[in-house]
Every structure is written in structure tokens, then in C-alpha cells.
Amino acid sequence: MYELKNHTESVVKQVLKEYREKCSLTCSCERCLADIMALTLNQLPSRYYVTTRGKILTQWEADSLPDRTRVLSAITRAVKQVESSPSHPISKED
Ligand SMILES: [Zn+2]
């Protein structure tokens, strides 16, 4: 089984996790997190590679990966966008 993976997505997931440990989100439900992921990934170049059973089969240029600073600023922008127009009504109780 060959699988396509986007390395940028793994980087974004990791940086978003760290972001959430430092800053709290207005809403951190699955829907809002998915919106943040999508908006962040749309700002960054994709870096796909082929993997089988977790083994990477294609090489990619590590240097061409978006750096953490760039990922973090994309996340910050996405969070602001989701918070100003969330996909669902935000209840103040949560
Ligand atoms: Zn939400």
C-alpha cells in the first residue's frame, strides 16, 4: 500500500499543538481546528511524499520545507480568521 503524505501537514499539526499549549483558542472544537488547519495549509506550499508502512520512499528537499516561523505566522493568521468568522455559533459557556 502506497500512501501520499503531505509533510507540510505534519509540520502544521505539530506547530498547532505547540501553539495551543501557549495560547488558548476561542473555540477548540474539531470543526474549528479543522478550519484552522485548512486555512493554514492553504497559505503554505504542499510537500508530498510517498510512503509505505511508514517508510518514506521518495526524497524531498528538507530545505524547501516551510520553516516554523512561517508556519506559526500562517497559524496565527488562520486563528484570527476563524475567530472573527467561526463556522458555527460560539457559546460563551464553553
Ligand atoms: Zn468550534
Image (tube, rainbow, N blue to C red):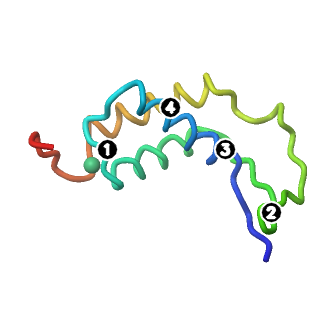
Q: Amino acid at mark 4?
A: Glu
Rounded to the nearest angstrom, the CA distance separating label 4 from label 2 is 26 Å
Q: For residue 27, which quarter of the picture?
A: top left
**Neighbours of disc 2 within 10 Å: few (<14), some (14-19), many (20+):** some
Image depth: mark 1 or mark 3 in front:
1
The residue positioned 69% from the left and 27% from the top of the image is 67
* Residue at image mark 2: 51
Q: Which residue is mark 3?
A: 8
Q: CA distance from mark 1 to mark 3?
A: 21 Å
Kindly check if marks 4 and 2 are in contact, taking CB atoms under 8 A apart as contact: no
Circle nearer the viewer, 4 or 2: 4
Badge 1 residue CB within 8 Å of ligand 1: yes
Q: Nearer the viewer, residue 5 or 55?
A: 55
Residues marked 4 and 3 touching at CB (< 8 Å) = no
Separation of residues labelled 4 and 3 (CA atoms): 15 Å
Check disc 4: other Cα within 10 Å, few if <14, some if 14-19, many if 20+.
few
Tell me the residue that label 1 is attached to: 28
Question: Which x, y percent locates residue 17?
Answer: 49, 38
Question: What residue sits right under mark 4 in the picture?
Answer: 18
> Left or right: 72 with respect to 28?
right
The amino acid type of the residue labelled 2 equals Thr
